[in-house]
Image (cartoon, helix red, strand yellow):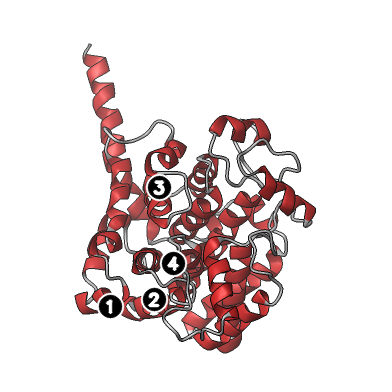
Amino acid sequence: MKKLLISFLIAHLLVITAPVEAASSESEISQRDRIMGAIMGVFVGDALGVGTHWYYDLDNLKKDNGEWITDYQDPKLNSIGRHANVHKYRYEQGIRAGDLSQTGQLYTLLLESVVEQGGYDRNDFAARVDGLFETLNGKNFSGRYTDQAIRETWANRQAGIAWDDPKVGSNADTSEAAQMNTALAALFFDDPEELARNAYSNTKLFYSNDFPITHSVAYSLVVGGLINGVPLADMEQHIRAIDPRVMARYAPFPDSRHQVYVGQTAWDPDTRLASPHLIAKLYGQHCEIQQLLPAAYYLVHYYQDDFESAVLSAINGGGNNMARASVTGGMSGAMVGLSGIPERFIKGLNNHEELLELAGKVADLTQN
């Protein structure tokens, strides 16, 4: 009985002290490594979802993709999932394992703009988005598949609404801008107010709704904080310390801007899941950013120094696993650095050398 009690106490002590142990090793990772890890982490999560996207029934996810997804896969020509038509469409468009989604394409355009302009130039990025829009027809089955926020923004641009008009963006509540904002977190990680301003400006290109805007800006601040070495345990306070007038303007929903703290439930023995990928079922598997981000926050708290487990748990949770894995990958990549991302995930990305070069050049901009 005494041995059982000791074992029980040790097990609980390990769970409680895990954040402290992870935080102590964070200082050994260079900022350059963190920047490149954050940027590439988004690409990895996005590409992992391309072939395994939108299964809301986890049994069907397993039947089509195996008991546990561990790597990039082709879209399924004959999927049994709810969105089999999306898989078939992507497959017929020639999209294969290691390719990026349309959100990944937009993210690449932003990184290219940042590198060529030597920083964030909203007008230059918007012009590049217009170039991509010229290849689309405004329908969902267009390009590599076009989500609601991009379809609605495309329609507004077709109607002549200017990029600097507050109404140009969509009323959707999805996460495309949050994923793209990782590039801005890499640029402005050491100036949270400047990061909030630029993340807001970038998010407004695609969204007119303050709710997803708040979440997207808050996500960028979390990634920026992680790049700058802020421990997860201190992240909520880090965001609260930003000038409240700045936050009220660029992230107007207070509860949403501080939501990163929900991830700390992963440290509590009473709420720590034995199967952490099921967090997607608890918070919701759908495309809304208010479902995606809490699950991602949970996973990066659960797996503080384990990129692979965090991102694969996001993928194996089903639903919009592509977006969930992408935002998880951005945060986890910032925590573990590029050196902490398994090599197969980097080399398995199509055009990985070009993507790595982009990430490196963005990192170089912050060292000058």
Q: Is residue 3 left or right of residue 354?
A: left
Q: Earlier in the sequence, mark 1 or mark 2?
A: 2
In percent of width and height, residue 283 lies at 38, 44
Q: Quadrant of residue 303?
A: top left
Q: Residues within 10 Å of mark 3 (few under 14, many from 20)?
A: many
Q: What kind of residue is marked 4?
A: Asn
Circles 3 and 2, Cβ within 8 Å, touching? The answer is no
Q: Regarding mark 2 in the picture, which secondary structure is present there? A: helix
Give the CA distance from mark 3 to mark 1: 26 Å
How far apart are the two marked residues, 1 and 2, measured between alpha carbons?
Answer: 9 Å
Answer few, some or many: residues within 10 Å of disc 2's Cα (few below 14, many 20 plus, some between 14 and 19).
many
Residue 248 on image: x %, y %: 24, 74
**Amino acid on which the number 3 mark rests in the picture:** Ala
Judge depth for marks 1 and 4 and give the one in front: 4
Whichever of labels 4 and 3 marks the residue nearer the N terminus, that label is 4
According to the image, label 4 marks what residue?
Answer: 171
The residue lying furthest to the front in this view is 159
**Amino acid of disc 1:** Arg
Nearest to N terminus: mark 1 or mark 4: 4
The residue under the point 72% across, 43% down is 76
| Distance of label 1 from label 4 (alpha carbons) | 18 Å
Residue shown at 27% from the left, 29% from the top: 10
Name the residue tied to disc 3: 295
Amino acid beneath label 2: Tyr
What percent of the width, then of the height, locates residue 120?
A: 50, 83
Numbered label attached to residue 249: 1
Work out whether 64 lies above or below 359.
above
User: Quadrant location of residue 351?
Assistant: bottom right
Instruction: Give the class, few, some or many, for how many residues have Cα within 10 Å of label 1's Cα (few <14, many ≥20).
Output: some
Whether residues under marks 1 and 2 lie with C-beta atoms below 8 angstroms apart, the answer is yes
Q: Which mark is residue 200?
A: 2
